Amino acid sequence: MSIAERLAEVNRRLTQAATEAGRDPSEVHLVAVSKTKPASMIREAYAAGQRDFGENYAQELRDKTRELADLPDIRWHFIGRLQANKAKYVAPVAYRVHAIDDVETAKSLLAKRDATAGPLTVLVAVNLGGEAQKSGVPPDAVLPLATALQAAGVVVAGLMTLPPDVEDPEAVAPYFEALAGLAERGREAGLPLRELSMGMSHDAHIAVRYGAGYPLWVRVGTAIFGERA
Ligand SMILES: *Cc1c(COP(=O)(O)O)cnc(C)c1O
């Protein structure tokens, strides 16, 4: 299958899952995760209409934005763990930074953000499984961090999670539900947590069930670009 065909299939499945869940499919936004894949594949997806792309590695993101600078309305989402000393590669080009879990990294990004690139817009990463090897703050630290980020001048658009790896994708449903609940609590507390970032190739169809009424970013790589080496 070509990338255009895979993309169409992913979009078809997302629309179907949203409709089955009674959710407006237009709330579901696909981020095509292109990490480790060549710029030529991104061009193929772009030609098929895809505009949002996700990258995990700061230098790779910088290199690809240079190679693809002729695609004016492409939007880059940084979805990986970010070291503060690499903020300079991400800040100028990121439409969203999905995995912020401390104020310091956000401040490094702010310092490197050019005003012409628009406000720095992030999602707070939440570690719902309490896994030491994963980034993200525990649930009870979300609202204090979001408040501190806002005070620092960052736009906190919402919350992101990478749930524990499980055999049965259905087993992640409680984590997605929990993330939606946390965002709702944040909104009740006056924070503008409208967006959720959750769901990947194997479980995006489950993520679409939660957080209806607000935008959802699903981050799908393998199902569009194939297995990574
Ligand atoms: C790689 C990655 C994805 C995409 O995963 P697939 O299983 O290839 O769809 C999504 N989110 C994050 C944070 C990733 O690192």
Image (cartoon, rainbow, N blue to C red):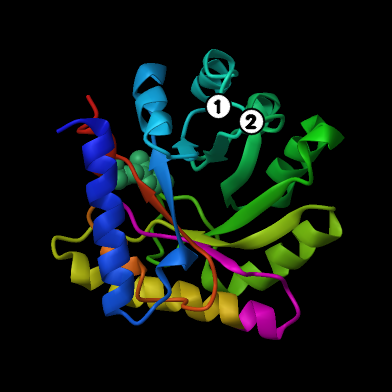
Q: Quadrant of ligand 1?
A: top left
User: What residue is disc 1 on?
Assistant: 58
Q: Position of residue 85 (x, y in %)?
A: 67, 26
**Within the image, what quadrant is residue 207 found in?**
bottom left
Q: How many marks?
A: 2
Q: Determine whether the residue tagged by mark 2 lies in a helix, strand or loop.
A: helix
Above-or-below relation of 179 to 145? below
User: Could you tell me which residue is drawn at 31 percent across and 53 percent down?
Assistant: 11
Q: Amino acid at mark 1?
A: Ala
Discs 2, 1 touching: Cβ within 8 Å: yes
Could you tell which of marks 2 and 1 lies nearer the N-terminus? 1
Q: Amino acid at mark 2?
A: Val
Which is nearer the eye, 174 or 227? 227
Q: Is residue 177 something one can see in this rendering?
A: yes
Distance from label 2 to label 1 (Cα)? 6 Å
The CB of the residue at mark 1 lies under 8 Å from ligand 1: no
User: Could you tell me which residue is drawn at 56 percent across and 36 percent down?
Assistant: 76
Question: Is residue 160 magenta-colored?
Answer: no
Q: Magenta residues, as a range?
A: 185-200
Mark 1: few/some/many CA within 10 Å (<14, 14-19, 20+): many
Which label number is shown at residue 90?
2
Which label number is shown at residue 155?
none
Which is nearer the eye, 129 or 184? 184
Q: Quadrant of the C terminus?
A: top left
Q: Position of residue 166 (x, y in %)?
A: 20, 61
Q: Determine whether the residue tagged by mark 1 lies in a helix, strand or loop.
A: helix
User: Could you tell me which residue is drawn at 65 percent across and 77 percent down?
Assistant: 186
Mark 2: few/some/many CA within 10 Å (<14, 14-19, 20+): many
Q: Is residue 34 something one can see in this rendering?
A: no
